[in-house]
Image: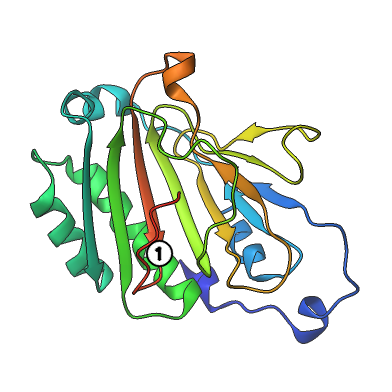
C-alpha cells in the first residue's frame, strides 16, 4: 500500500471546479481521488476471489447479525471476530484488516470503527448522504450499495459491484456529495447481503 504516501499537489486540489463525478478504476489508487472536493465517490473495482460465495455461505445462513468494533485496525478486527455468531474465514478477516488499515491511513486516524453486518431486509431505503466525514463500504455478498449523482428520479442509479470498495464523502465535508442507499432486497427478493462499513472513530450513524 505504498500509494498511501502519495498526496495531491496544491494545484490539483485547488483546480478549477468541475462537475461532481464518480471515479471508478481497478487501480486501488483511485480511492485517493475521494480526497478531492469534486469527487464524492471513488470505487475500487476488485475481482471476486475464487470460492468466495461458498466460503461466506455459512455466515449468510446466520443472518441477520451485526458486529461493531472500534480500535486500531488490528485490534478492531480481533474484537469484531469475537462478536460474530460463528468463526469467520481468515481470508475475510484479512481483507477487513486491509481495508480498515487503508481507511485509517486515508483519513489520518490511528483507529477505525468497523461494522460487519448480514442484512436480510431493506436497511435504508431512502437515498441520502451520510452524516460523516468519510465512509468506506464493501459488499462481500449480495446486492451492492446503490448510488446516483443527482435526483434518483431523473438520474441513472448504479450499484457498487460485489467486493468493490466504495469511498463516500459525507456531508461533514465541504464539496460534492453522492446520494446512496441500501438496495431494496425485500421487494426484489434478492438474497441477504454481507456488508462491511468503515467509519472514522466516534461515528455512530447507522445509515449506510
Image quarter hosting the N terminus: bottom left
Q: Nearer the viewer, residue 150 or 40?
A: 150
Q: Which residue is mark 1?
A: 199
Q: Nearer the viewer, residue 52 or 189?
A: 189
Residue 140 at x, y percent in the picture: 37, 37
Residue 98 at x, y percent in the picture: 35, 58
Q: Left of 154 or right of it: where is 3? A: left
Instruction: Residue at the far front: name it.
Output: 126
Residue 75 at x, y percent in the picture: 17, 68
Q: Left of 186 or right of it: where is 44? A: right
Instruction: Residue at the far right: name it.
Output: 16
Q: Nearer the viewer, residue 90 or 33?
A: 33
Residue 134 at x, y percent in the picture: 52, 66
Mark 1 surroundings within 10 Å by alpha-carbon count, few (fewer than 14), some (14 through 19), many (20 or more):
many
Residue at screen point 35% across, 64% down: 204
Instruction: Residue at the far bottom: name it.
Output: 10
Residue at screen point 42% across, 65% down: 102
Amino acid at each position: 500500500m505504498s500509494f498511501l504516501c502519495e498526496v495531491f499537489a496544491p494545484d490539483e486540489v485547488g483546480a478549477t471546479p468541475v462537475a461532481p463525478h464518480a471515479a471508478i478504476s481497478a487501480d486501488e489508487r483511485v480511492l485517493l481521488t475521494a480526497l478531492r472536493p469534486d469527487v464524492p465517490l471513488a470505487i475500487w473495482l476488485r475481482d471476486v476471489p475464487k470460492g468466495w460465495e461458498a466460503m461466506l455461505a455459512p455466515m449468510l445462513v446466520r443472518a441477520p447479525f451485526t458486529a461493531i468494533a472500534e480500535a486500531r485496525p488490528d485490534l478492531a478486527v480481533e474484537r469484531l471476530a469475537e462478536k460474530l455468531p460463528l468463526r469467520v474465514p481468515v481470508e475475510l478477516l484479512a481483507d477487513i484488516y486491509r481495508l480498515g488499515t487503508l481507511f485509517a491511513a486515508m483519513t489520518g486516524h490511528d483507529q477505525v470503527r468497523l461494522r460487519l453486518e448480514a442484512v436480510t431486509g431493506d436497511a435504508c431505503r431512502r437515498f441520502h448522504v451520510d452524516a460523516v466525514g468519510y465512509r468506506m463500504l464493501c459488499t462481500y455478498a449480495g446486492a451492492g450499495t446503490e448510488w446516483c449523482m443527482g435526483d434518483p428520479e431523473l438520474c441513472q442509479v448504479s450499484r457498487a459491484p460485489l467486493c468493490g470498495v466504495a469511498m463516500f464523502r459525507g456531508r461533514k465535508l465541504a464539496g460534492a456529495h453522492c446520494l446512496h442507499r441500501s438496495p431494496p432486497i425485500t421487494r426484489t427478493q434478492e438474497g441477504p447481503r454481507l456488508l462491511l462499513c468503515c467509519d472514522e472513530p466516534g461515528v455512530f450513524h447507522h445509515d449506510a
